[in-house]
């Protein structure tokens, strides 16, 4: 049985993270979206146990609310009350029939302070009691047209409701949903470049690109030039010191000097952190989730390569994930974004030409992010990877990213 767990980001109007929906697949079926039966109960239970007990919800959501699908049986059993109400949002699946028992169970959750969300909402009069109790209503922008959604919005009392737009895949869809009154947004609109033509970089962003080019100019990094570039930029200095003093390193004494910070990293890790710090600078006007997702991708691909040996260099494996959304950060084509950054051929093959084992690993990670479990299975089989280890490696990468306190 191949089991996977993933999280999908939910944004507010400022494109900041509001929370994450936790999704699970077990066995040969995609359980989390179907009707309420024993398998769905087991799937939801697995998400809850893995998130709140085994891993700790802080590891997976970074302290943000966790949206979890609840089946009819789990609602009737008051399973949600086992978990903190400030960390859990109970999603009521669209397939649940609003029986008197279900309404009573939801009313009790509401009374105890739990937030309820109606998933994949389509209006029917029978849903009125659940609409009244719910704080969040999720509309699918792929399943329904904006006109149909607007019509449903007129049929319900929106006072005190947060409207969540699902399947938002472009910035244009994001702008449309926001103009319609939506406050929360779920989808991958943030992971595509807003333009695909060259644009002029600000002097500050150009300095980040220059730093990456300097770090990739040869096998040996010129420590003096890199140190000066970091010292001359207050933001870069702050980010480097924050990384070195993060929980990941567990240093007893705080490091306050750039030279000392570089010494702590060591030459092997220095290039990795330079790239990460520079990307953080490039992401200043983008959703924070982009750099977090890039780092998680890098860590997952690096660890998969360490374990299964697809290419000789773990550094190359990390770079493929880390740079996988550089085009989004710079709003240019990937080939343009990578100009002047000297990366191994296997890295450019994956990022520009979309070929090679590192590209396949990247696609595997993206399929997990998007809960495209059929595609995940395809890559797991093709790469001959132990599927049972995928979720463990993914969640370890999430924890690693959180420990860096970005």
Image (spheres, rainbow, N blue to C red):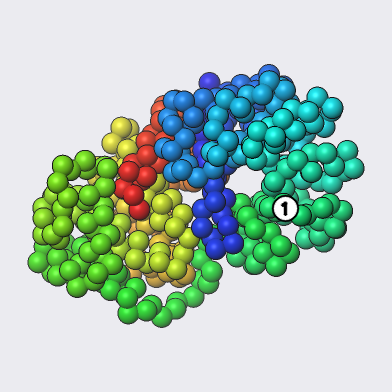
As drawn, 378 above or below 330: above
Q: Secondary structure at mark 1?
A: loop
Visible residue check, residue 382: no
The answer to which of 113 and 195 lies nearer the viewer is: 113
* Position of residue 384 measured from the top left corner of the image (x, y, whole percent): 42, 30
* Position of residue 180 measured from the top left corner of the image (x, y, whole percent): 73, 64
Mark 1 crowd level (few <14, some 14–19, many ≥20, 10 Å Cα): few
Q: Please tell me which residue is depicted at 49% across the width and 31% down the height of the picture.
A: 51
In the rendered image, which residue does mark 1 sit on?
Answer: 160
Q: Please tell me which residue is depicted at 32% across the width and 38% down the height of the picture.
A: 303
* Position of residue 252 measured from the top left corner of the image (x, y, whole percent): 16, 42
* Position of residue 50 measured from the top left corner of the image (x, y, whole percent): 49, 27
Visible residue check, residue 322: yes
As drawn, 170 above or below 255: below
Q: Please tell me which residue is depicted at 61% across the width and 27% down the height of the picture.
A: 81
Q: Quadrant of residue 394?
A: top left
The answer to which of 107 and 375 lies nearer the viewer is: 107
């Amino acid at each position: 049985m191949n089991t996977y767990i993933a999280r999908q980001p939910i944004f507010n109007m400022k494109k900041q993270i509001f929370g994450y929906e936790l999704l699970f697949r077990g066995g040969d079926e995609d359980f989390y979206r179907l009707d309420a039966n024993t398998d769905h109960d087991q799937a939801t239970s697995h998400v809850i146990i893995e998130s709140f007990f085994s891993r700790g919800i802080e590891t997976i959501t970074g302290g943000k609310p966790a949206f979890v699908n609840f089946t009819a049986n789990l609602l009737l059993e008051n399973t949600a009350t086992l978990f903190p109400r400030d960390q859990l949002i109970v999603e009521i699946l669209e397939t649940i029939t609003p029986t008197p028992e279900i309404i009573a169970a939801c009313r009790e959750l509401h009374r105890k302070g739990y937030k309820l969300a109606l998933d994949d909402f389509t209006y029917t009069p029978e849903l009125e009691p659940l609409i009244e109790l719910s704080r969040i209503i999720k509309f699918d922008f792929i399943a329904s047209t904006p006109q149909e959604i607007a019509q449903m919005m007129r049929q319900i009392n929106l006072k005190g409701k947060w409207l969540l737009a699902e399947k938002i895949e472009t910035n244009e869809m994001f702008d449309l949903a926001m103009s319609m009154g939506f406050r929360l947004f779920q989808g991958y609109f943030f992971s595509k470049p807003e333009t695909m033509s060259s644009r002029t970089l600000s002097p500050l962003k150009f300095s980040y690109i220059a730093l990456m080019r300097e770090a990739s100019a040869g096998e040996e990094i010129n420590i003096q030039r890199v140190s000066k570039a970091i010292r001359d930029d207050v933001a870069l200095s702050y980010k480097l010191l924050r990384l070195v003093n993060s929980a990941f390193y567990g240093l007893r004494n705080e490091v306050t000097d750039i030279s000392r910070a570089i010494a702590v990293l060591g030459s092997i890790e220095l290039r990795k952190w330079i790239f990460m710090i520079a990307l953080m600078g490039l992401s200043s006007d983008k959703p924070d989730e982009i750099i977090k997702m890039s780092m998680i991708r890098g860590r997952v691909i690096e660890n998969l390569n360490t374990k299964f040996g697809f290419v000789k260099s773990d550094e190359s494996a990390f770079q493929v994930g880390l740079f996988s959304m550089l085009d989004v950060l710079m709003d240019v084509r990937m080939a343009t974004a990578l100009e002047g950054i000297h990366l191994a051929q296997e890295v450019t093959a994956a990022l520009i030409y979309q070929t090679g084992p590192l590209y396949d690993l990247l696609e595997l990670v993206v399929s997990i992010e998007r809960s495209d479990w059929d595609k995940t299975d395809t890559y797991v089989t093709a790469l001959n990877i132990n599927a049972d280890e995928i979720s463990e490696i993914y969640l370890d990468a999430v924890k690693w990213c959180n420990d860096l306190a970005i």
